[in-house]
């Protein structure tokens, strides 16, 4: 939680009695000021002060310059990457390599085909929670004066027995509530993933995933992308990305988040020494950036590798190219936008008051 900033201390000034000389000089100075003509011109500023002011203004850069420079650098890097990948694909050895490893690693026999309805629901709920979690997480980092504070009830879900109830911002309370729902959804997903065998589609099971990842990366970078059929088989980069997201990034987000939450037992010296809060803070934000990056790339590929088919896979559990997947996707965006609007303190404060004490 970002604490409000602390104001600088103010000094104390002691009054000094006026000496007779200063007391005599004061009326004289006032008389001189009164007798001076009102139209007396103000003496011009010295050349030195003008040049310093001009230099100060000249030293300031427009606010858009830095973002524009970053975009320009990214575009140059991306252009160099594309040109380099396309040149590589003209080499006979690289062509033979891509022919031998088309970008799709081996799957176990009996790996399921298609996207079941439960996975579509899990996908929507994950998107719903992760958008709001990222939003509240960024608010926690940015806010200097929270809209209010919340303290959990003693021996409650957010403050287990033996813990001293902690006072946190309303934003952090909402962030933790969303975390609980996201983790619950994730646990259901993991159970169903292994119960139905769909884990075989996102867990690497053969070392051939490494050369196929390299092959898929060259194909993506050259803008001549590998053949896509997510209904049957993800390519090697997709498999690894899903594996990292589900089995590495998500657990890291949970483990680092718990350390900064109201659940952590601050009175346990051994635990605090073994797992300092600074470690959690240093890990939590980069993990969030990973989720943002994954989401951006994921959405980009969904729309540029066959939007209608991909959206039907995820939202209607059908391998067709009609408009229903897009329609349901747009409805899901409306639901997320409504939740975004309702996540304001005016709506969340009454709920928080039922779960603990709200204060200013």
Image: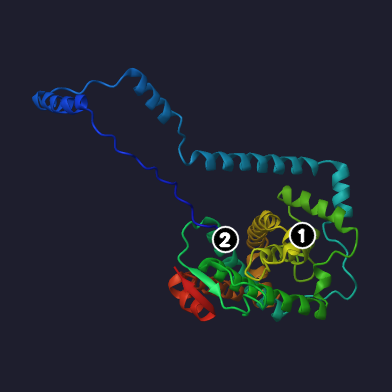
39 left or right of 181 in image:
left
55 to 212, vertically: above or below:
above
The C terminus appears in which quarter of the rendering?
Answer: bottom left
Mark 2 sits on what residue? Answer: 1
230 left or right of 52 in image:
right
Tell me what residue is drawn at x 78 percent, y 76 percent: 193
Mark 1 sits on what residue? Answer: 274
- Residue 320 appears in the rendering: no
Give SS at disc 2: loop
Q: Horizontal and vertical percent for residue 28? A: 13, 24
Tell me what residue is drawn at x 81 percent, y 72 percent: 199
The residue nearer to you, when weighing 3 against 251, is 3
- Residue 89 appears in the rendering: yes
For marks 2 and 1 on the same chain, the one whose residue lies earlier in the sequence: 2
The residue nearer to you, when weighing 148 against 76, is 148
Tell me what residue is drawn at x 82 percent, y 77 percent: 194
């Amino acid at each position: 939680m970002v604490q409000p900033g602390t104001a600088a201390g103010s000094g104390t000034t002691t009054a000094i009695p006026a000496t007779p000389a200063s007391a005599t000089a004061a009326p004289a100075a006032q008389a001189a000021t009164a007798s001076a003509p009102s139209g007396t011109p103000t003496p011009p500023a010295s050349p030195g002060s003008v040049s310093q002011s001009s230099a100060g203004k000249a030293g300031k850069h427009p606010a858009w310059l830095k973002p524009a420079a970053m975009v320009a650098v990214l575009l140059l890097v991306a252009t160099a990457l594309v040109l380099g990948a396309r040149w590589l694909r003209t080499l006979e050895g690289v062509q033979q390599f891509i022919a031998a490893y088309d970008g799709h690693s081996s799957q176990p026999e009996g790996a399921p085909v298609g996207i079941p309805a439960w996975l579509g629901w899990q996908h929507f709920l994950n998107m719903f929670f992760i958008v709001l979690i990222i939003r509240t997480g960024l608010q926690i980092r940015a806010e200097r004066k929270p809209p209010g504070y919340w303290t959990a009830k003693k021996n409650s879900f957010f403050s287990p027995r033996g813990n001293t109830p902690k006072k946190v911002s309303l934003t952090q309370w909402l962030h933790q509530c969303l975390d609980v729902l996201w983790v619950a959804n994730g646990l259901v997903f993991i159970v169903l993933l292994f119960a139905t065998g769909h884990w075989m589609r996102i867990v690497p099971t053969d070392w051939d995933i490494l050369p196929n990842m390299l092959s898929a990366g060259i194909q993506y970078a050259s803008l001549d992308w590998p053949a896509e059929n997510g209904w049957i088989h993800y390519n090697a980069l997709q498999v690894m990305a899903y594996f990292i997201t589900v089995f590495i990034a998500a657990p890291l987000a949970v483990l680092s988040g718990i350390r900064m939450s109201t659940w952590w037992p601050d009175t346990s010296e051994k635990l605090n020494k073994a797992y300092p809060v600074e470690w959690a803070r240093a890990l939590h934000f980069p993990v969030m950036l990973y989720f943002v990056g994954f989401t951006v790339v994921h959405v980009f590929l969904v729309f540029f590798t066959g939007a209608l088919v991909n959206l039907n896979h995820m939202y209607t559990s059908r391998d067709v190219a009609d408009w229903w997947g897009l329609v349901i996707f747009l409805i899901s965006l409306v639901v997320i936008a409504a939740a975004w609007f309702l996540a304001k303190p005016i709506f969340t404060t009454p709920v928080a008051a039922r779960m603990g004490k709200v204060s200013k």
